[in-house]
Amino acid sequence: MYRPRDDMRKTSNGENKSPDEPYLPVPGTLPDRFMRSYTKLMRHPRSRTARNTARATFPHYVADILDRHCAANFPDENPADQARTITVLAYLYPAIVMRNEPYVTLDPPAIIEVYTDLIDLGPYDFAQRYNIADYEGYLYDDVDYEPLPRPPDVRTPYHQLAEHLCPEDRSKGEALLDTAILAALNRQTISHLISDSLATLWLATIPAATIAIFWEPLLLPVCIAAIALAAAQATASLLRRHAGAATSPIEQWRANNPSPEIGDFAHAYWHPAKRHLHRTRFLGMRLWRRKPLSKHNYHAMLADRLKRARRDDTTRQLIDYIEQGEDL
């Protein structure tokens, strides 16, 4: 079991091994995604997206810290040897942390201390010190290794498309995408409502047309009604044909990335609470809102429901949705 030393923060030359400046990853890189996902996971432990992102990007976070440390402190050493040691330690660091809590943490100074111990102690003593004797074989120079692979993108097509629409501000990109989704859903809904009503109206027109043959004053109203029904049917067909249409940037992204129709994004990727709260009624018809709700709207709705002591499924789903918000 690892035990802290009095000189754990000193090198053999007596220099402080901790970086003079706080570690700040380059925005948008894999180490940056790890730090954001880890921060979110501390606030919302149930977030699957944060957990999967942190797990996939953690080795790159460790490697980036050690790359900077070696570049600043050991610029003359063999880069290939450094890369091998850094890569192996990036893979093994989760096991080291789990077996040596609370003495070993995820902080950059702790990672640098472990790396320095690996260099100073050698594979056998290092494995004994950190209780990873079963991984000792990976620490020797004659063991083949592969560079860190780029992790798969754990984001859904919804979040990828939102980032494509506005890389600078993900929230704005989601708002643009939600607006397009709601427009497509309303086109689908209105098309279905018209189509469902037309069959009944056409059946009602047939007896009226039969009567108009024998009673001339009814002929003009029947013709007008038939023209109106034909126009409604053409409108329904047009809406159905363009139900999946979207703006040009969305269509360009969907052409190069497999994904559902834009109107199906709500059922495929939206949280149940988000789907429920974006439904509305107009003249007795069940439609969708024209504009997406903001984070402020969700919090206001939750506060109102809690104020009225409503503890139903919708309230619980809304709490869960707010907790899992701010995706990576």
Image (spheres, rainbow, N blue to C red):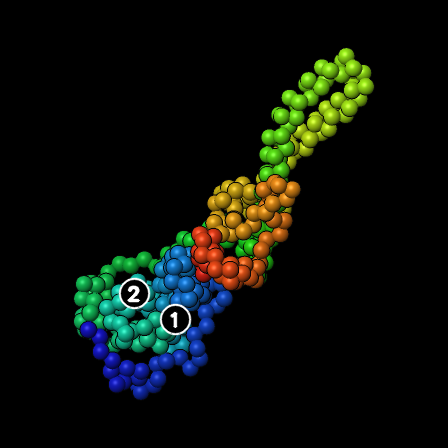
On the image, which quarter does residue 106 sit in? bottom left
Disc 2: which residue: 94
Which circle marks residue 65 in the picture? 1
Question: Would you say 4 lies left or right of 228 here?
Answer: left
Q: Are marks 1 and 2 in contact (CB under 8 Å)?
A: no
* Amino acid type, mark 2: Pro
Instruction: Name the residue rendered at 31%, 87% in the picture.
Output: 14
Compared to residue 194, the image places residue 80 above or below, namely below
Q: Residues within 10 Å of mark 1 (few under 14, many from 20)?
A: many
State which quarter of the image contains the N terminus: bottom left
Which circle marks residue 79 in the picture? none
- Distance between the Cα atoms at labels 1 and 2? 15 Å
- In this view of the protein, which residue sits in the foreground, 323 or 130? 323
Instruction: Name the residue rendered at 64%, 36% in the picture.
Output: 239
User: Is disc 1 placed on a helix, strand or loop?
Assistant: helix
Horizontal and vertical percent position of residue 11? 30, 83
Instruction: Name the residue rendered at 45%, 53% in the picture.
Output: 312
Which label's residue is closer to the chain start, 1 or 2? 1
- In this view of the protein, which residue sits in the foreground, 53 or 303? 303
- In this view of the protein, which residue sits in the foreground, 250 or 11? 250
The answer to whether residue 1 is seen in the rendering is yes
